[in-house]
Image: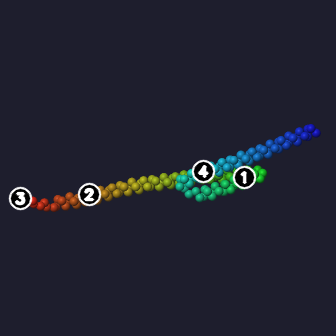
Amino acid sequence: MLFVGMLLLIGALLSSSLSSGQVDKSSIRLQEARSDVEHAFSEVQSTQDTGANVTGLLERLNVAVDLLAQAENAYRSGDLTSAEDYAIQVTAAAKQVTAQSMDVQQSAFDSTKGSYLFSVVVVTVGSLVFVLALFLVWRHFKTHYVTGILKSKPEAVADN
């Protein structure tokens, strides 16, 4: 009888440690999922700060947040398997949003860089054309002025 009692006690301890391990694993997965969503959100914010269109990224981020809410609800209700499954989906979705955010940020940077270079070229060429036009106009008026002076007859001054 003592042997059976000890077996029951050991079985109860093992089952509680196994379920505790399951709870810890689910809790860790949920924390990782939260962290991934926060990182994805900060990446989307920095992408928006570069001036890129982040509408699609925000929609995907909202899907990840909805999955995170479902994972937390499943965890609170005790459905640890579903909570882990949702947490895995959240992590995958958040990492996808982070990667896409970095791609959009890089393309926005490349676009901005191209626009900047185009602006520099246009300003440089425009300035050169303006200076050349000023020089040509000055030369034209100078030649007309000089020829006008040379063609004029000096008036005789009467000696008194």
Crowd around label 2: few <14 · some 14–19 · many ≥20 (10 Å): few
Q: Is residue 160 left or right of residue 101?
A: left
Label annotation for residue 139? 2
Reading the image, the residue beneath label 1 is: 72
**Mark 1–mark 4 CB contact (< 8 Å):** no
Residue 33 vs 136, above or below: the answer is: above
Which comes before the other along the chain, label 2 or label 3? 2
Of circles 3 and 4, the one toward us is 3
Number of labels in the image equals: 4
Which of these two is toward me, 105 or 159? 159
The answer to the question of whether label 2 and label 4 lie on touching residues, with beta carbons closer than 8 A, is no
- Expressed as whole percent of the image width and height from the top left, the position of residue 13 reads 83, 41
Tell me what residue is drawn at x 9 percent, y 59 percent.
157
Label 1 Cα neighbours within 10 Å, binned few <14 / some 14-19 / many ≥20: many
Q: Position of residue 40 (x, y in %)?
A: 62, 51
Question: Within 10 Å of the Cα at label 4, are there few (<14), some (14-19), or many (20+) other Cα atoms?
Answer: some
Q: CA distance from mark 1 to mark 4?
A: 21 Å
Question: What amino acid type should be assigned to the residue bearing mark 4?
Answer: Ser
Gap between marks 3 and 4, in whole Å?
95 Å
Q: Quadrant of the N terminus?
A: top right
Label 2 vs 4, first from the N-terminus? 4
Q: Work out whether mark 1 precedes mark 3 in sequence or the reverse, and give the earlier one.
A: 1
